[in-house]
Image (spheres, rainbow, N blue to C red):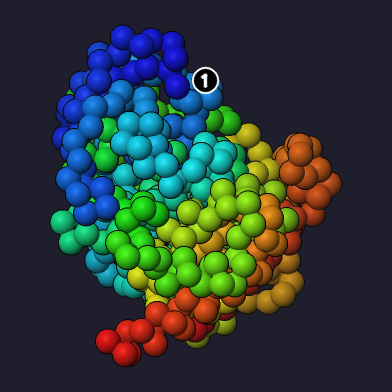
């Protein structure tokens, strides 16, 4: 592997200082499941690797039924799905957190890394978008919030400016009669990259007969993870019915602009966009009713 | 090997119950350190990118010592500073084999053996956390460990048998 120096940063300002000074020569290390492979294979280069796992804010994992969920960018995913309270409150996020790699990868991999790697197929991203996650990012001088659906600029590219690092995700408190779901289509049961994935979050009325609001996002069908606002909005204010769910799933499908690659063809991905969106909505509704 | 002049860093970790201080370059993986610096060659290099699990070790950085299964090829040696690490060498008691190892042998749950240390370590991590896993839980937990010889069934059966035997051993005290 290429040679680099290693700095275990202890604070956001220490990490931001190094980013400001070294520019693109500095690479952040969280769980390392992407960056170590990329550095080893020469796909990215680093003069200095800044380990952000020791920064307290990036390790925060707190849930408050009124304030919502805070997930530090460097929290490994096993900590999220092993937290019974979080698992009860956000089953749709757990769907996503528990399918990133195998067990050993989950001991290290983080949602922060998954999001900053910015793969169009990133496993956690449709779920985070559906749950209205907001990314909090920091530079030496400024902190700002970015709704996750606006975080991505292209395959492997985010809207982070030079010198900025991702600190945490903030996810709104779970609403009554609401739930999320996330599904991934792969040819085997586990440990594969999505052909298509879908995340949904629905809020029902107290009678559980109507949808108050819904958010739907797709993965692996566009240059970035895709928030399909129109699909969720089409469900809002409508009775729960097979026709209305079908119409929303068709809107999600219409927004998908996939490519053909080794994992699937355009035709298959277009078809799956509909199927995965529909099933994710159905599963979220089923959970919201439970 | 683009720059061999990059200076080495001293790192202290507890490996298989012993405090060990070693020198490593920041670019060296924990797997390279274990094998080439410390001489513990139980963890194997299969894919070197986190797909095969042959390099699995249990690592903990919290004082309570709750171990987490990781691929040592995806950890930098310098990240092991202050960590407690268990490799396959730390699983067997001094006088023989761990029950998981014995049951793997008895059940012919290995052929060429390259993947076996990873499976033993991953199985140990599973049974520490969940002493009575279902077949589905075993298969899901071990999905990150690849074996190209056995077809997996004997491995899955061995882990389930080891769980039974270990709970009987525990009942016997």
Determine if residue A84 is in view: yes
Q: Is residue A94 shown left or right of residue A221?
A: left
Location of mark 1 (residue): A42
Which one is in front, A30 or A132?
Answer: A30
Residue A220, image quadrant: top right
Residue in the picture at 19% in, 35% down = B21
Relative to B166, residue A249 above or below? above
Determine if residue A166 is in view: no
Residue in the picture at 36% in, 84% down = B169
Residue in the picture at 38% in, 59% down = A78
Using a 10 Å C-alpha cutoff, classify the residue at mark 1 as few (fewer than 14 neighbours), some (14 to 19) or many (20 or more). Answer: few
Query: Where is residue A130 shown, x and y percent of the image?
Result: 50, 56
Query: Where is residue B96 shown, x and y percent of the image?
Result: 37, 65
Q: Mark 1 belongs to which subunit?
A: A
Outermost residue to the right: A267
Which one is in front, A24 or A44?
Answer: A44
Mark 1 element type:
loop
Number of numbered discs: 1
Outermost residue to the bottom: B172
Query: Where is residue A203 shown, x and y percent of the image?
Result: 48, 70
Residue A31, image quadrant: top left
Which one is in front, A150 or A6?
Answer: A6
Relative to A150, residue A46 above or below? above
Residue in the picture at 57% in, 59% down = B143
Outermost residue to the front: B95
Which one is in front, A110 or A66?
Answer: A110
Q: Is residue B128 shown left or right of residue A12?
A: right
Q: Quadrant of the N terminus of chain A?
A: top left
Relative to B20, residue A218 above or below? below
Relative to B131, residue B173 above or below? below
Query: Where is residue A96 shown, x and y percent of the image?
Result: 50, 58
């Amino acid at each position: 592997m290429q040679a680099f120096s290693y700095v275990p940063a202890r604070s956001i300002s220490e990490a931001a200082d190094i980013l400001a000074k070294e520019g693109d020569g500095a690479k952040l290390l969280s769980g390392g499941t992407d960056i170590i492979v990329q550095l080893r294979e020469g796909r990215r280069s680093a003069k200095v690797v800044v380990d952000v796992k020791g920064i307290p804010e990036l390790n925060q994992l707190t849930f408050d039924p009124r304030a919502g969920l805070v997930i530090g960018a460097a929290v490994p995913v096993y900590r999220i799905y092993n937290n019974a309270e979080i698992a009860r409150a956000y089953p749709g996020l757990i769907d996503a957190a528990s399918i990133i790699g195998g067990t050993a990868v989950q001991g290290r991999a983080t949602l922060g890394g998954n999001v900053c790697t910015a793969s169009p197929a990133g496993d956690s991203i449709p779920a985070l978008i559906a749950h209205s996650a907001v990314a909090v990012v920091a530079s030496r001088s400024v902190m700002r919030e970015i709704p996750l659906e606006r975080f991505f600029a292209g395959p492997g590219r985010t809207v982070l400016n030079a010198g900025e690092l991702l600190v945490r995700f903030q996810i709104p408190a779970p609403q009554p009669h609401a739930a999320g779901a996330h599904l991934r289509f792969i040819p085997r049961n586990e440990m594969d990259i999505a052909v298509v994935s879908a995340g949904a979050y629905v809020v029902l009325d107290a009678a559980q007969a109507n949808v108050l609001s819904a958010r739907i996002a797709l993965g692996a069908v566009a240059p970035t993870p895709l928030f399909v606002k129109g699909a969720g909005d089409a469900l809002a204010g409508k009775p729960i019915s097979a026709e209305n769910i079908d119409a929303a799933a068709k809107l999600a499908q219409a927004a998908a602009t996939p490519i053909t690659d080794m994992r699937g063809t355009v035709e298959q991905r277009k078809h799956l966009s509909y199927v995965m969106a529909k099933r994710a909505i159905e599963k979220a509704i089923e959970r919201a009713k439970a | 090997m683009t720059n061999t002049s990059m200076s080495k860093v001293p790192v202290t970790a507890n490996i298989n119950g012993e405090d060990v201080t070693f020198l490593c370059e920041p670019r060296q993986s924990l797997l390279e350190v274990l094998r080439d610096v410390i001489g513990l060659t139980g963890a194997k290099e299969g894919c070197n990118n986190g797909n095969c699990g042959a390099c699995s070790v249990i690592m903990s950085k919290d004082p309570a010592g709750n171990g987490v299964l990781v691929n040592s090829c995806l950890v930098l040696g310098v990240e092991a500073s202050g960590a407690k690490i268990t490799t396959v060498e730390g699983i067997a008691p001094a006088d023989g084999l761990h029950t998981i190892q014995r049951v793997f042998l008895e059940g012919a749950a290995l052929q060429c053996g390259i993947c076996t240390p990873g499976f033993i370590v991953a199985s140990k991590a599973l049974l520490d956390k969940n002493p009575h896993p279902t077949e589905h839980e075993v298969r899901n937990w071990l999905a990150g460990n690849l074996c190209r010889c056995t077809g997996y069934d004997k491995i899955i059966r061995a882990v389930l048998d080891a769980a039974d035997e270990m709970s009987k051993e525990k009942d016997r005290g």
